[in-house]
Image: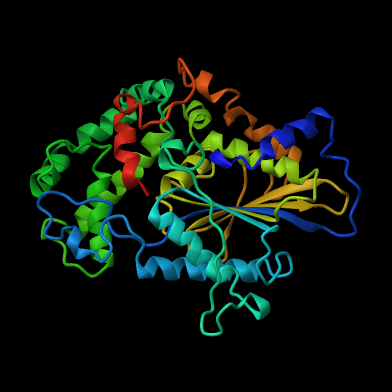
Amino acid sequence: MAGGQFGWIQAALLQLILGVNLMVMTPTQARSLRFVTLLYRHGDRSPVKTYPKDPYQEDEWPQGFGQLTKEGMLQHWELGQALRQRYHGFLNTSYHRQEVYVRSTDFDRTLMSAEANLAGLFPPSGMQRFNPNISWQPIPVHTVPITEDRLLKFPLGPCPRYEQLQNETRQTPEYQNESIQNAQFLDMVANETGLTDLTLETVWNVYDTLFCEKTHGLVLPPWASSQTMQRLSRLKDFSFRFLFGIYEQAEKARLQGGVLLAQIRTNLTLMATSSQLPKLLVYSAHDTTLVALQMALYVYNGEQAPYASCHIFELYQEDNGNFSVEMYFRNESNKAPWPLSLPGCSHRCPLQDFLRLTEPVVPKDWQQECQLASGPADTDSKAAEKSSVQVEAENGGWG
């Protein structure tokens, strides 16, 4: 269904209206995992763009800009294998369509990452092997057009109130101090790259391009020293905080990451009242998606989400029949996922407390809170209303 609703919202609201009590379920004999939601970033990719003086242009990359690399495919296959091991005994060892639903943004790199991940999570065996020479099977990955995606592609827009908040953020002491402290540095980078309109909000593009080139063994220009790269990296992280924090973080969350959080809350609520839905819901998206969600949850660590990093929500039914939510963040492939605790709650957070604590950052009416005069329009027909942030974000600009 367009928008990735799956009919879950309506069903959840119906059950809540009917007075289903999440806290009084039939007791189980032992604590058990009931439902998992994953949000991960795509794997290693080529740069999304270059700069005028860059000696490496698009033909340097086998598939062009913004595309998943072989390294990225392997990262997600390995993540799929790790998830297969983590959820052994919860998920079937073979793919069952009733158990899994995968939604991706409509970018090649996120769609392909999901496919590589599923190849690691559900390698075919027995009757599922359609060719004895191929250890792979097709598994559906769902998406909607980029212009219609109001769940996973951030920043969300058009949203006049969000743009107003960004303008106000630019007037804060923190933003102003960053501008002053980095003015000469930005002038240097602009001169070396040939970019004429470099700002605190766009310099991340330069870091991203240089990072991708260095990662793939290309020699960086002399001006891109380790000290310069460290400073660019810090400004890149600042740009994420500018988008989703620094100023009025809770309201920004209601207009951005809280939209995805609302869907996750709905799914958790419904799974606590039903056993008829998938066991695993997967979102394949971008670093901005992860940051927007984690800022809304107040668990963001201040750094860009690495390739193939994964935020995990696990819904458990306790031995007394109540439900709890545990969160983890897998941002290192050679370590177990880090436990995350929602502020004000323990790591094993009772579902009712999780819902109560996250309620303030979930929009009641996104359109109204964005101060939109009419319903969200297809951005193809509203190009004139695109903000500077949206222009940077579109067509692979973030992620």
Q: Residue furthest front?
A: 130
Q: Classify the position of the N terminus by image quarter.
A: top right
Q: Nearer the viewer, residue 201 or 187?
A: 201
Q: Residue at x 25, y 51 (%)?
A: 207
Q: Does residue 308 appear anywhere in the picture?
A: no
Q: Does residue 143 appear anywhere in the picture?
A: yes
**x, y (%) of residue 187?**
12, 40
**x, y (%) of residue 303?**
41, 49
Q: Residue at x 68, y 72 (%)?
A: 93
Q: Residue at x 84, y 40 (%)?
A: 23
Q: Nearer the viewer, residue 77 or 6?
A: 6
Left or right: residue 293 versus residue 398 is right
**x, y (%) of residue 165?**
40, 23
Q: Residue at x 41, y 41 (%)?
A: 146
Left or right: residue 249 versus residue 357 is left
Model colouring:
rainbow
Q: Nearer the viewer, residue 58 or 26?
A: 58
Left or right: residue 199 versus residue 22 is left
Q: Where is residue 197, by image quadrant?
A: top left
Relative to 136, is 3 above or below?
A: above
Relative to 382, is 92 above or below?
A: below
Q: Residue furthest top?
A: 373
Count of numbered circles in the view: 0
**x, y (%) of residue 117?**
52, 65
Relative to 54, is 180 above or below?
A: above
